[in-house]
Amino acid sequence: MPMTDSPMLAPRPIDDLQGWLLAFGQPTVLIELAALAVCALLAWGLARVLRGALSERESRNSVLFGRRIVDGALFPMLWLLFGYMARAALIAHLPLAVFRVAMPVLVSLVIIRVGVKVLQLAYPAAPWVRVLERTLSWMAWGSMVLWVSGLLPLVLEEMEQITWKLGTSTISLRTLVEGVVTASGVLILALWLSSVIEARLLRTAVGGDLSLRKALSNATRALLLFMGLIIALSAVGIDLTALSVFGGALGVGIGLGLQRLAANYVSGFVILAERSMRIGDNVRVSDFEGRITDIKTRYTLVRSGSGREAIVPNEMLITNRVENLSLADPRVWQSTVVSVGYDSDVDLVRRLLVEAALSQPRVLRDPGPSAALSAFGADGLEFTLGYWMADPENGQLGLRSGINLAILAAFREHGIDIPYPQRVVTTKVIDAPARPG
């Protein structure tokens, strides 16, 4: 029997399988499949054109595009848009069957793609993101099945009958579920906007500018999540005036048990606002020296030259003594010590040391390297070669090794000896006493 479709009415339950088979056995189904395929090709082509306007890095980190064209959220969005346009054009001429199933499927796909991509972008390393992704997928596909089968209105009607008292208000199960869905959508939208703003702010920022933009992005995310939480609570039906009691309890909890955690969050914003420590600075905290790679709201990551990373609570950076080696000047001074024989030409040695340092492109020319006779050693003359670098984050041992190799080659070429430790051993012979005759 022919099936009619209306854009404003939900599909009615189909009591027999024969109705579905008759609907999908009509010749017009081929026209619907062709129209749906054309919509998919148009969506894929437009998504590819839009992705070409962005750089490879921007498109891969985007919620809309993902790693591949069909992997992002833009492709199913465009497919859904073109599908609605084709459905509106065909509904007046054909009894629709394929579009009746395809449109809820595309809606579910859009919801899943947007939710999953936003969660992956906002919390890339959180272990609970996978659980939320699966929960979102099951909920979206389950709703789609109920919609296609026509059982969704019946389920909603039954949920409306389940009610309970919450203070002076009466809340039904349907209201609670719809509020949770609305709240989830609002929070996902807030996370999406905050991630987009953060990506824009941090795109070309370096050094101190990066720290300032990081502070702005953290503040923007906190503000958007707070607004999203307020809207979500209103959507669920919770009276916001009742939150004053909860806020008082939360304040007591922070004062008693969460004060250290709150202090770390506040310290993180203070560090970013004062710019006393910036992303890229070289610092020494409790005998651990390294470069600040990121400043989170709760902790700061410090990476040493050996690859070790220290997670330092922000409160520790505020209350304890921290040496910032590059606060006023990012340049770092380094030295190497070498010994030569006492008969060596001092002026030649100093010139060779300076030339060895200048042979490395990472050594700064202004201020330039300098060599000085620093000590009279037990085995030879000790010279200290000092030089400046502007990129300690690229490693310091490699630069020192390169300079030492250049010094060794220059000394061997000019016949300058690096003395071995010399020790004088004196043997004293004691005559044995004469034996009595």
Image (spheres, helix red, strand yellow):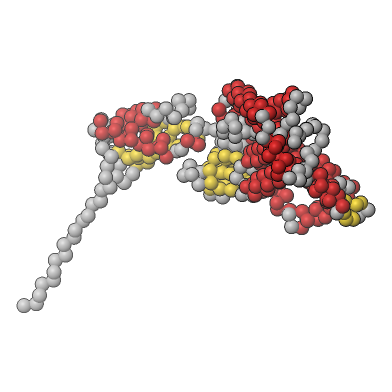
Q: Quadrant of residue 42?
A: top right
Residue located at (73% from left, 53% from top)? 259
Which is more toward the observer, 302 or 218? 218
Q: Position of residue 30 (x, y in %)?
A: 64, 29
Q: Position of residue 311 (x, y in %)?
A: 59, 48
Residue located at (74% from left, 30% from top)? 95
Q: Position of residue 156 (x, y in %)?
A: 82, 47
Taking the image as shown, residue 101 lies to the left or right of residue 182, namely left
Which is more toward the observer, 321 or 34? 34
Residue located at (58% from left, 23% from top)? 52
* Residue 184 showing in the rendered view: no
Taking the image as shown, residue 394 lies to the left or right of residue 176, namely left
* Residue 254 showing in the rendered view: yes
Q: How many marks?
A: 0
Taking the image as shown, residue 25 lies to the left or right of residue 4, namely left
Q: Quadrant of the N terminus?
A: top right
Q: Quadrant of the C terminus?
A: bottom left
Taking the image as shown, residue 356 lies to the left or right of residue 107, namely left
Direction bottom: furthest residue: 437
Check the image and report above or below for 116 versus 164.
above
Q: Position of residue 138 (x, y in %)?
A: 68, 47
Which is more toward the observer, 43 or 12? 12
